[in-house]
Amino acid sequence: MWWLPRGLHPGAWWLWALGLATAASHTTNPLPLALLVAVAGRVLGRRRGDAPWALAFRMYVWLGAVIVTMRVVFRIVFGGGQGDHILVRLPEIPLPAWAAGIRLFGPVAAEQILGGFYDGLRLATMLICLGAANALANPKRLLKAVPGALYAIGTAVVVALSVAPQLVESVLRVRRARRLRGASARGMRALRGIALPVLADALDRSLALAAAMDSRGYGRTAAVPAGQRTVTGALVLGGLVGVCAGTYGLLDTAAPGYLGLPMLLAGLTAAVTGMLLAGRRVRRSRYRPDRWRPAELLVAGCGVAAAALTMLAGSVDPELLYPPVSPLTWPQLTPLMLLAVGVAAAPAWLAPPPPPTVSAGRPPAVDRPIPVTDVPADGVRAARASTPGDRP
Amino acid sequence: MSVLRVAPRTAVVLTLASAAALATFTWPFFVPAHPESTARTGEAPLVFIVMLPVLVALVLAELTSGGIDSKALAMLGVLAAVNAALRPLGAGTAGIETVFFLLVLAGRVFGPGFGFLLGATSLFASALLTAGVGPWLPFQMLCASWIGLGAGLLPARLRGRAEVAVLAGYGMLAAYGYGLLMNLWFWPFSVGADTQLSYVAGAPVLENLHRLALFTAVTSTFGWDTGRAITTAVAIVLAGPAVLAALRRAVRRAAFGAPVTFAAASDRPAAKVTGIPQSSSQAT
């Protein structure tokens, strides 16, 4: 059953987090925003594993704090959103004309600081929600779910992720070889002596990897009739022309209304359809694919529902979601908003718990479709022997 | 020598998508000020944040749609890994940026299409490794991709010292351009709407440029960008010749674009099948 410990489909966590971010983008009221941050933290506390990416959340919280502080400090130093409730009067510093006649500091009003704080908190909350998705979803499994058209890029990123740790091992090996030969150069020369052999080693490794991929049948493509290729090309090109026109329409008031968002959406849809059609050329099999099961649907549904409830609350009572800064009012919560926050928090209990730690430190799923280390020994020896910096 | 052939259709797609993407960076200069359109412009930044990842995905899919060679793919992955491993080295230490140097050199050796892909995959892999996926990532990916693309488009005939000098100059320019574009993207989000440093909707482009310059000066990103430009140029001058040689050697060994022919087993001497890296180009 779905409450057995297992990793959730990464797409479900991303949809949930995007729903929360959408909800946050529809309000500047600090109470629901603070609640949403708390919800993200709570779900994370109950449902994250102990993989390296699960530790990223703290960075996002710091980034959010920096954004809020920056907004408020900018408001204090550069003014904006003046009000009547003056807290302090700082000495004004007028700047010369080349600086656009800006004056620094001056009176600081409560409205000014609150406005900056509200705006910054909204942005920070959206960011923290995305941070929760980063920490909860396994990025390697997400790469497995990319559409066929992006398969090559996804494979390249998987190769990059698998090779990066091996570079450390490569550095250690080159350093050991240098020490054995009694090389004692330091500083710039030592860096050269290590960096270049490591680079050459990595490049040789890529050739060995390509041979391994070829021998396992990588690059098999399905035959696509010429007619279909023309259609996909036309869809992608036409869609992009639509996107350009839509962008122009969005930014130019003189343009007719249909040139704005509708054109942009139509263009994007056409282009993405073309891309997905083009992806049918790629034939591949998947080992243990992630499926959308009830738990995934529930988690994603919670995010979507939270966003929808917030929008509904906004249409019922916009005043409460965007509390006015002047006159100063105390922000309030509506039952609808509380319900949205409650729904957003539900995955903390509805989602299956994360799988227990694997002793070897490797994630349980198969993350390496391509065996990078599978090189015959003589190939590696040949590659190592020809590494330029390795010669005595 | 171009590892990834860019078909005419791909070039058109790349140009169109780049034009639309440039608007997602520079919209503060063009946003109109008329009150009746504020409802439309209020949502413009969010629309762009959603639109850009799709555009980047489209271009990447189009570039690889011709079927990318397995050797090029492995090279792409390995170089992206090196770039991603280089990136944390400079993170946090005032403006030392170590990503662009290998990106510029690889774009030069492997050609514009490969450079574009390498820019995007490097930043994506590094975001996954150090866990920094956010709304800024597609914008960073695209900027880095443009840098790799531009490096591939530099005049091909240059060699020796002139080549290193041109690459170092390009690296400096690219570092400043990257800083400026990312600043431009972050500008509306970091200062909010109505301070004296914010953009003014509908104001002349020059006035907004003035404000942007002040914002960059205030947030001390001038110093940051200068540090990045100097690091890139110095790294290219010091390590450039050796790295270029290593990359070119890899291109020769990989023999990209060599036609693969199949022959009956009896025609081939058995002893020749041992060399692993050359296996797919051996039959030429």
Image: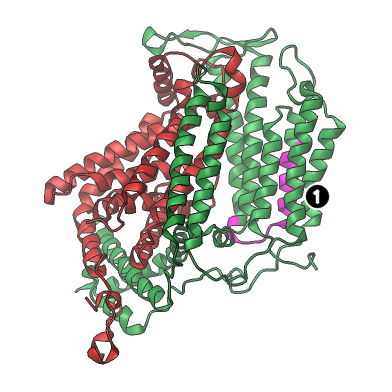
Chain colours: A green, B red
Q: Characterize the magenta stretch by its predominant secondary structure.
A: helix
Compared with residue A135, is residue A324 higher up or lower down, i.e. above or below?
above
Viewer-closest of A122 and A223: A223
Q: Is residue B128 visible?
A: no
Residue lying at the far right of the rendered structure:
A335
Percent across and percent down for residue A270 are: 53, 43
Query: What secondary structure is found at the residue carrying circle 1?
Result: loop
Quarter of the view holding residue A198: bottom left
Q: Which residue is rendered at x = 67% and y = 26% of the image?
A: A118
Left or right: B107 as drawn, with respect to A276:
left
Q: Is residue A29 visible?
A: yes
Percent across and percent down for residue A372 are: 43, 73
Q: Which residue is rendered at x = 71% and y = 63% of the image?
A: A354
Disc 1 residue type (three-letter): Ala
Left or right: A87 as drawn, with respect to A170:
right
Residue lying at the far front of the rendered structure:
A227
- Can you identify the residue that label 1 sits on? A346
Magenta segment: A35-53
